[in-house]
């Protein structure tokens, strides 16, 4: 499988896209051709456990990794000891046609573990074969940073420099990151907000000479390795949702997915699964008050907002106003034409908005996309309501997904809602909704009490450069 940029240039093989997210022409890496899933192939996968299924699905994309090596990487990434559930991704019926897909059973209690655990194994493998090292530089407002650190800590060929804003994350999120004491984990607490952290990372990443000298890389949401690993759980969820369907009716049996969205990474994997032939009726995109993507799917106008115009909400991992993966969907929408995609992004850069209203009528019939926006009050009401009806406590992001999912349930079509985080991570909002915090288990209490280590830094590019120059692996 060869990868190309959405703006036309050739990129290389899967190993190449694992290490480098952005193409030299500014576009994003996409497979030259999407693999196909048919009914017989899906049925042959039904008996597989999660790690085996991930091997089969990722193997369609990672054709330059030996299948035995890939199987080993997937067994390590999806080892039962790292997940709260033996099945890795359990499904749980909530009634009224809704099912929760448990993507947050991993080490940091958010769905980002599903991709990051695999990426950690895969990067380590590729680097050990090539004899290289890589220093991962990133900025986080919570879930991404901890998922990355928990996937990379203790590895010899990888180090991670993760910038986080002072006083902006929950106590739980801080503990998850800062309690990692491995030598290769550098938590850098910046005296500023998330945006300041991201600006610092961007400046260094744009300095090609510095990047090369210190072997800097990224594991952000545009990394195609992450996108490919996420496709596996859409297939898994479809298989488990159709286990009880009589055999004669399984082929083509449609389900819908509801996805709490920010950078459009999670739902993009759903779009690929559907395009490959997985029987998916609708992809229900849920956003919070930062509703740029809802506007796009309703009108065809994409109007990204500045950081200053981005609301701080109670589903903070969805506080995104520029969806970094959207270009991959637009590429498909425009007939996989690099010329049209490049022209669209040039227009976006010039005008600050992208007008695809002439294509909007195709979003639902051809691509299955519908969307909706939720608010803080919706989130609280949904958390309360689900708790009262089913005894399940959902986190604020999953609540956004559930609210919009309910608006799109169709008779006879299971609605699978992706659980993107566990409620313990967002105790304040749960307390606001239910009047009490989620009961902390022993692991949570131990985590909150564990010693923490971090380096405090002013919002100063020179100081960050000096720190990396001193501590980076070489
Ligand atoms: C990252 C994240 C999201 C958004 O996912 P995208 O892939 O960026 O669309 C939603 N919920 C939670 C809890 C997250 O951590």
Image (tube, grey):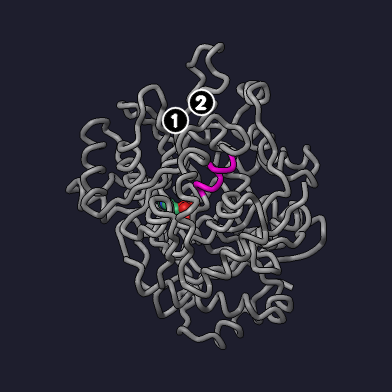
Say above or below: 266 vs 234: below
How many neighbours does mark 2 have within 10 angstroms: few (below 14), some (14-19), or many (20 or more)? Answer: some
Q: Residue at x 56, y 51 (%)?
A: 329
**Label 2: which residue?**
240
- Identify the main secondary structure in magenta: helix
Q: How many marks?
A: 2
Counting from the top left corner in percent of width and height, residue 378 is at 24, 48
Q: Residue at x 77, y 46 (%)?
A: 1
Regarding residue 385, the answer to whether it shows in the image is yes
Q: Specify start and end residues of the magenta stretch as a single range.
A: 266-273
Q: Label 2, label 1: how many angstroms apart (C-alpha)?
A: 7 Å
Q: Determine whether the residue tagged by mark 2 lies in a helix, strand or loop.
A: helix
Question: In this view, which residue lies farthest toward the left?
Answer: 435
| Mark 2 vs 1, N-terminal side | 1
> 47 or 304: which is nearer to us?
304
Q: Nearer the viewer, residue 75 or 64?
A: 64
Image location of residue 403, percent across then percent down: 30, 42
Judged left or right of residue 377, residue 69 is right
Residue behind mark 1: 91
């Amino acid at each position: 499988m060869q990868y190309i940029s959405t703006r036309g240039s050739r990129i290389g093989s899967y190993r190449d896209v694992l290490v480098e997210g952005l193409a030299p022409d500014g576009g994003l890496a996409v497979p030259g051709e999407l693999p196909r899933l048919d009914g017989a192939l899906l049925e042959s996968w039904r008996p597989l456990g999660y790690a085996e299924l991930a091997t089969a699905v990722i193997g369609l994309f990672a054709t330059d990794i030996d299948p035995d090596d890939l199987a080993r990487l997937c067994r390590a990434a999806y080892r039962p000891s790292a997940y709260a559930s033996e099945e890795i991704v359990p499904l749980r019926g909530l009634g009224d046609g809704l099912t929760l897909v448990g993507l947050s059973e991993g080490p940091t209690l958010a769905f980002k573990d599903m991709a990051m655990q695999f990426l950690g194994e895969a990067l380590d493998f590729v680097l050990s074969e090539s004899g290289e090292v890589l220093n991962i530089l990133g900025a986080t407002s919570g879930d991404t940073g901890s998922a990355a650190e928990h996937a990379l800590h203790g590895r010899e060929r990888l180090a991670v420099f993760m910038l986080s804003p002072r006083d902006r994350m929950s106590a739980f999120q801080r503990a998850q990151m800062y309690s990692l004491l491995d030598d290769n984990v550098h938590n850098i607490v910046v005296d500023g907000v998330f945006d300041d952290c991201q600006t610092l990372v961007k400046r260094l990443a744009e300095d090609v000479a510095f990047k090369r000298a210190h072997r800097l890389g990224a594991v952000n949401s545009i990394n195609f390795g992450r996108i490919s690993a996420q496709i596996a759980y859409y297939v898994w969820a479809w298989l488990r949702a159709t286990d009880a369907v009589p055999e004669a009716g399984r082929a083509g049996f449609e389900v819908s997915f509801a996805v709490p969205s920010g950078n459009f990474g999670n739902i993009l994997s759903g779009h690929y699964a559907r395009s490959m032939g997985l029987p998916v009726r609708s992809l229900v995109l849920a956003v919070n008050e930062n509703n740029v993507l809802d506007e796009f799917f309703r009108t065809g106008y994409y109007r990204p907002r500045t950081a200053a115009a981005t609301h701080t909400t109670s589903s903070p991992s969805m506080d995104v106003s520029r969806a970094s993966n959207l270009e991959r969907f637009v590429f498909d929408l425009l007939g996989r034409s690099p010329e049209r995609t490049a022209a669209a992004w040039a227009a976006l850069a010039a005008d600050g908005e992208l007008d695809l209203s002439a294509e909007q009528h195709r979003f639902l019939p051809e691509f299955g996309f519908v969307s909706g926006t939720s608010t803080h009050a919706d989130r609280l009401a949904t958390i309360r309501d689900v708790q009262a009806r089913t005894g399940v406590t959902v986190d604020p992001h999953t609540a956004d997904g559930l609210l919009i999912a309910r608006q799109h349930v169709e008779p006879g079509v299971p609605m699978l809602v992706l659980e993107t985080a566990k409620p313990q991570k967002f105790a304040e909002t749960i307390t606001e909704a239910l009047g009490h915090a989620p009961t902390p288990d022993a692991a949570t209490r131990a985590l909150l009490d564990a010693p923490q280590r971090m380096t405090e830094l002013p919002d100063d590019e020179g100081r960050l450069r000096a720190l990396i120059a001193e501590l980076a692996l070489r």
